[in-house]
């Protein structure tokens, strides 16, 4: 059987660059090498796309970049910049072999988190290049990344969420008394402040004291010009994985028990003390509610391939959607693969399935295009 040529993209120009590298290393370690001919392309923080031919274990540590640069300088090597500015679609879908012949790419797996990767930008590039890719299309990626737009879509789908106030970066200075009053009236204290477009909890703060609101807004404003102030939801953090295209399935649900006051960046990636409980100890009707909302959210946003949907489950049994992640973390401690493992799909099989779904989606899109 001819191997399928898969290009894995990692890194990216985002505050989640490091997380993406760890995710990609984990995906690469679990890919079926009998089936896939794997190529790796790392996107540096400055936006260079470098083909990488070294050891997978150097991706997580960041040492890959030095190796890739050295290979680039080494005339004997066939490495090259995979994508240079301005984006070249020809370069995007071909690699050169030792004889300088083009080698095609069958499918791309963009293991990229956050802006400039998970937000439709890279998906747009892949769409233009006419290459199938794993995960959501441009619209679902962009709307899923933007916490305000996804809220609007989920509200329309009848899914409960935290109330919020939108603030633009330019509005912070000079409107603090007004904003503090609005929070007191509409949301109450404590509240949560977060960038509308980010991830991995960067720029997210829990604000207990009105005096700290401005600092929290300015911190979130470092990551996005649009900021959300949200009502605090006291609840357990429950996550559900979704897999499929038009008829997606939901996994069993898991619980995150953060080691800090909330699931901040340290609790996620640094301290290593946050706990993951799979399956979550919840009554079956709550699990079903979470799964139903997850599928509804996935369909409402027009997702394809995969997404992880995150919730709060309150003491009174209320299920509140927190956010969707269209390219969830894939590190060894990440929920997405663990949830599927617990639901009967081992990690290598999950990756194969995601690649098959990418081809299925591509075929469907081609057909609808041809019909027009
Ligand atoms: N409205 C909220 N009520 C309670 N906790 C929240 C709220 N919003 C966020 N959090 C806490 O902050 C964490 C990160 O926020 P989230 O919106 O998921 O951002 P990110 O996209 O960066 O993961 C959540 O996992 C949760 O612990
Ligand atoms: Mg989150």
Image (tube, grey):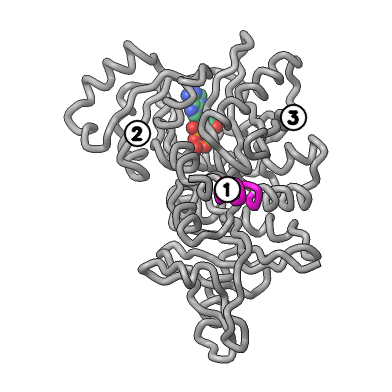
Compared to residue 191, the image places residue 81 above or below, namely: below
- Mark in front: 1 vs 3: 1
Q: Is residue 240 visible?
A: yes
Residues in magenta?
A: 358-367
Instruction: Please say if the residues under marks 1 and 3 sit with CB atoms less than 8 Å apart.
Output: no
Q: Which mark is residue 227?
A: 2
Q: Residue furthest left?
A: 174
Q: Cα distance, mark 1 to mark 3?
A: 33 Å
Q: Secondary structure at mark 1?
A: helix
Q: Which mark is residue 367?
A: 1
Disc with the residue nearer the chain's start (2 vs 3): 2
Could you say where residue 154 lies in the image, as x and y percent from the top left? 49, 24
The residue at which mark 3 appears reads as: 252
Compared to residue 312, the image places residue 204 above or below, namely: below
Mark 2 crowdedness (10 Å alpha carbons): few <14, some 14-19, many ≥20: many
Disc with the residue nearer the chain's start (1 vs 3): 3
Q: Secondary structure at mark 2?
A: strand
Q: Is residue 360 magenta?
A: yes
Q: Residue furthest front?
A: 371
Q: Is residue 262 visible?
A: no
Mark 1 crowdedness (10 Å alpha carbons): few <14, some 14-19, many ≥20: few
Instruction: Please say if the residues under marks 2 and 1 sit with CB atoms less than 8 Å apart.
Output: no
Q: Cα distance, mark 2 to mark 3?
A: 32 Å
* Ligand 2 contact, mark 3 (Cβ < 8 Å): no
Could you say where residue 41 lies in the image, as x and y percent from the top left? 56, 67
Identify the main secondary structure in magenta: helix
- Mark in front: 2 vs 1: 1
Q: Is residue 184 left or right of residue 280?
A: left
């Amino acid at each position: 059987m001819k191997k399928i040529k898969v290009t894995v993209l990692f890194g990216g120009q985002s505050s989640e660059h490091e997380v993406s590298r760890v995710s990609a290393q984990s995906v690469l370690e679990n890919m079926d090498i009998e089936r896939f001919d794997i190529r790796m392309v790392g996107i540096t923080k400055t936006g260079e796309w470098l083909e990488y031919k070294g050891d997978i274990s150097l991706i997580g540590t960041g040492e890959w970049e030095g190796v890739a640069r050295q290979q680039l300088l080494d005339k004997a090597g066939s490495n090259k910049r995979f994508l240079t500015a301005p984006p070249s679609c020809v370069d995007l879908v071909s690699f050169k072999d030792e004889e300088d012949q083009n080698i095609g790419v069958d499918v791309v797996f963009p293991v990229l988190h956050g802006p400039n990767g998970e937000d439709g930008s890279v998906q747009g590039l892949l769409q233009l290049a006419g290459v199938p890719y794993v995960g959501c299309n441009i619209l679902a990626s962009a709307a899923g990344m933007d916490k305000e737009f996804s809220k609007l879509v989920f509200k329309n789908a009848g899914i409960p969420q935290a109330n919020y106030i939108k603030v633009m970066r330019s509005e912070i200075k000079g409107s603090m008394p007004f904003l503090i009053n609005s929070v007191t009236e509409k949301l109450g204290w404590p509240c949560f402040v977060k960038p509308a477009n980010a991830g991995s909890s960067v720029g997210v703060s829990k604000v207990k004291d009105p005096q700290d609101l401005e600092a929290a807004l300015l911190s979130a404003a470092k990551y996005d010009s649009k900021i959300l102030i949200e009502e605090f939801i006291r609840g357990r953090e429950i996550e559900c994985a979704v897999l499929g295209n038009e008829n997606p399935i939901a996994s069993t649900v898991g619980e995150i028990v953060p080691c800090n006051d909330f699931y901040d960046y340290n609790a996620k990636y640094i301290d290593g003390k946050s706990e993951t409980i799979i399956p979550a100890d919840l009554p079956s009707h709550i699990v079903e509610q979470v799964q139903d909302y997850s599928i509804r959210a996935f369909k409402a946003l027009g997702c394809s391939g995969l997404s992880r949907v995150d919730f709060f489950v309150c003491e009174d049994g209320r299920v509140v959607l927190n956010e969707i992640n269209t390219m969830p973390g894939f590190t060894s401690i990440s929920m997405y693969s663990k949830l599927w493992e617990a639901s009967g799909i081992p990690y290598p099989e999950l990756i194969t399935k995601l690649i098959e779904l990418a081809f299925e989606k591509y075929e469907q899109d081609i057909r609808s295009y041809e019909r027009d």
